[in-house]
C-alpha cells in the first residue's frame, strides 16, 4: 500500500488489486467489501474519479487491503 501511515507487519505487505469494469460495477463491489472497514485510516479512499479512471482503496475488517481501478464515472 502506498501510504505513509502503513506500518509494515507480517501479513499486511500485500493488497488484492481488481482492475477493470465500469464505475458502477466497481462501486457496488467496493461498498460490499468495505462493510466494517476502518474509515478513519489514511488507507481508506472511497471510489472516485482520477485522471486514469475510477479508483478506490481500503483495508477490510479482516485486515485485507483492497485496491480497485476501472473506467471513469460517466
Image (cartoon, rainbow, N blue to C red):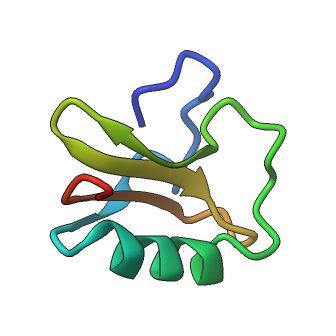
Residue 58 x, y percent position in the rendering:
58, 53
Residue drawn at x 29%, y 58% is 74
25 vs 63: above or below = below
| Residue 40 position in % (x across, y down) | 84, 38
In the image, is residue 52 above or below residue 23? above
Q: Position of residue 47 (x, y in %)?
A: 49, 53
Q: Residue at x 36, y 41 (%)?
A: 49
Q: Quadrant of residue 52?
A: top left
Residue depicted at x 52% and y 56%: 11
Could you say which is closer to the camera, residue 52 or residue 40?
52
| Residue in front for this viewpoint, 43 or 14 | 43
In the displayed image of the protein, which residue is found farthest to the front? 74
Task: Give the residue at the far top of this rendering.
Answer: 4
The x and y percentages for residue 41 are 75, 36
Q: Please state which of residues 29 and 58 is positioned toward the viewer in this rendering.
A: 29
When the figure is inspected, residue 6 is found, relative to residue 65, above or below; the finding is: above
Relative to 58, 55 lies left or right: left
Name the residue at 61% across, 56% down: 59
Amino acid at each position: 500500500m502506498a501510504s505513509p501511515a502503513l506500518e509494515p507487519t507480517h501479513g499486511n505487505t500485500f493488497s488484492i488489486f481488481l482492475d477493470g469494469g465500469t464505475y458502477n460495477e466497481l462501486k457496488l463491489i467496493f461498498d460490499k467489501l468495505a462493510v466494517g472497514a476502518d474509515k478513519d485510516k489514511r488507507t481508506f479512499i472511497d471510489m472516485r474519479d482520477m485522471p486514469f479512471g475510477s479508483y478506490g482503496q481500503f483495508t477490510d475488517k479482516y485486515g485485507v487491503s483492497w485496491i480497485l481501478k476501472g473506467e471513469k464515472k460517466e
